[in-house]
Amino acid sequence: MHTTLTALRRITPDVTAVVTVADDGGSSGRLRRELGLLPPGDLRQALAALAAAEDGGSLWVEVFQHRFGGNGALTGHAVGNLLLAGLFEVLGDPVAALDEARRLIGVSGRVLPMSLEPLEIEAEVTGLSDENGPRTIRGQVAVATTPGQVQRIDLRTPRRPGGAPTACREALEAVLDAEAVFLGPGSWFTSVLPHLLVPELHDALVRSEATKIVILNLVPQPGETAGFSPERHLDVLFQHAPDLRVDAVIADRGSVAVPARLRDAAANLGARALFAEVADPKVAGLHDPDALAGCVREALDLVGRRKG
């Protein structure tokens, strides 16, 4: 997410990040359990990505990202997580709190939660034991680290057992008003697909007339997507949102073993696959922001010509 937002900032200052709210681990999980608030960690990371200057960021961004050490009650908490938790409580409105935080650290875009209530990820997983059939596991950390194979996920509303997740109104407006919408890269089952499982957000993504682009991960994620090919990522996306159509799929050329298979998988979503050198040569598993920005521009130009 951080790299994608950094790349998009190369293209426009008008970027809105719509972030999942199912994290239940680390500092975010502790604050969620103790205070009943939205988990702030992923929201904090998005704010920091949109605020970071080209020279490494301002002092406020550095403080925002600072994580306490030691052995006391603050150990492991990021300053930004605590600040957001305080703003959530004082203002009583997560969107207003995030808007206030972005003014504090100098964010030119906007960060929004996909829902105003903490959500829980539930996954159907196979290969966990010799038992026949899949097992159900719950929680983002459990799903992200499972040694089994995730088949599909769903979202639960702990505050309203049995209820459907509701979308943040501002997030819906952002999707419907956008010129371009991007899905990925990121943890496929716990960061990308959850957006498609909030009914109102799913419908907005399907109805949106924006250019829709999927950016694939460079490598499978241990536990969550171990053994997945690039085309398998798209197949799973299609299984969770069969009505969604996208315009382009961006993939790193060196990460695709069989390009023809990815082209076919992209075609199932109505998209054209674009192959480029977008991996960071210095950091394994990460995209290079400049290269990714260049490929995004190419994708937008290509889709614009097709639609024109």
Image: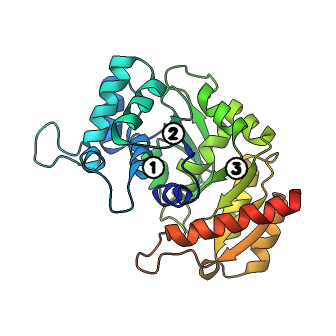
Q: Position of residue 285 (x, y in %)?
A: 47, 71
Q: If you read the primary sequence from the N terminus, does the residue marked by circle 1 or circle 2 appear first?
A: 1
Who's the residue at 58% across and 53% down the image? 12
Left or right of residue 231, residue 91 in this image: left
Residue beneath label 2, please? 110
Q: Secondary structure at mark 1?
A: helix
| In this view, 211 is above or below 293 | above
Q: If you read the primary sequence from the N terminus, does the residue marked by circle 1 or circle 3 appear first?
A: 1
Q: Position of residue 89 (x, y in %)?
A: 34, 20
**Quarter where residue 308 is shown:** bottom right
Q: Is residue 198 visible?
A: no
Left or right of residue 150, residue 250 in this image: right
Residue beneath label 1, please? 50
Q: If you read the primary sequence from the N terminus, does the residue marked by circle 3 or circle 2 appear first?
A: 2
For marks 1 and 3, give the CA distance.
Answer: 17 Å
Q: Amino acid at mark 2?
A: Arg
- Residue count near mark 3 (Cα–Cα under 10 Å), binned few <14, some 14–19, many ≥20: some
Q: Disc number at residue 180?
A: 3
Who's the residue at 52% across and 35% down the image? 112
Q: Is residue 262 visible?
A: yes
